[in-house]
Amino acid sequence: MHHPPLTPTEQQVLALLSDALGVGVIATRMGTSESTVRTHIRHIQDKFGTFSMAEITRVAVLHELEGCCADERAHQ
């Protein structure tokens, strides 16, 4: 499945979502606001054509299996 590439920040958000972290925890870890994290999540949803958090979490796990988010975890 082809989709527009994620930005490095979107990849980081996706990696953190795959760890089942909430928006508040992600915002704290990234040093940003919850609103900004939600914006990144919306961009990821738009790029992947997903609508629910369950779908975006599934995408995150699949991408982790493909290795796309492995580098993001190394920076935590």
Image: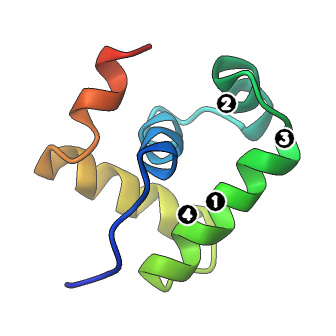
Mark earlier in primary sequence (4, 1): 1
Q: Is residue 60 left or right of residue 64?
A: right
Of label 1 and label 3, which has the lower sequence position? 3
Q: Please state which amino acid type lies under the numbered disc 1.
A: Ile
Disc 3 marks which amino acid? Glu
Q: Residues within 10 Å of mark 2 (few under 14, many from 20)?
A: many
Which labelled disc corresponds to residue 41?
Answer: 1
- Mark 1 residue element: helix
Q: Position of residue 50 (x, y in %)?
A: 52, 80
Does residue 34 lie above or below 38 as drawn? above
Q: Tag 3: Cα neighbours inside 10 Å, few (<14), some, or many (≥20)? A: some
The residue to which callout 3 is attached is 34
Secondary structure of the residue carrying tag 3 is helix
Question: What is the CA distance from the residue labelled 3 to the residue labelled 4?
Answer: 19 Å
Quadrant that contains the N terminus: bottom left
Chain-order first, disc 3 or disc 4: 3
Q: Amino acid at mark 4?
A: Ala
Q: Which mark is residue 26?
A: 2
- Give how far apart the Cα atoms at labels 1 and 2 are: 11 Å
- The residue wearing badge 4 is 54
Mark 2: amino acid: Ile
The residue drawn where x is 65% and y is 25% is 30
User: Label 4 near label 2: C-beta < 8 Å?
Assistant: no
Tell which circle, 3 or 2, labels the residue nearer the N-terminal end: 2
Is 10 displayed left or right of 11 in the figure?
Answer: right
Along the line of sight, which residue is nearer the eye, 30 or 15? 30
The quadrant in which residue 34 appears is: top right
Across and down, in percent, residue 45 comes to: 56, 73
Residue 43, placed above or below residue 66? below
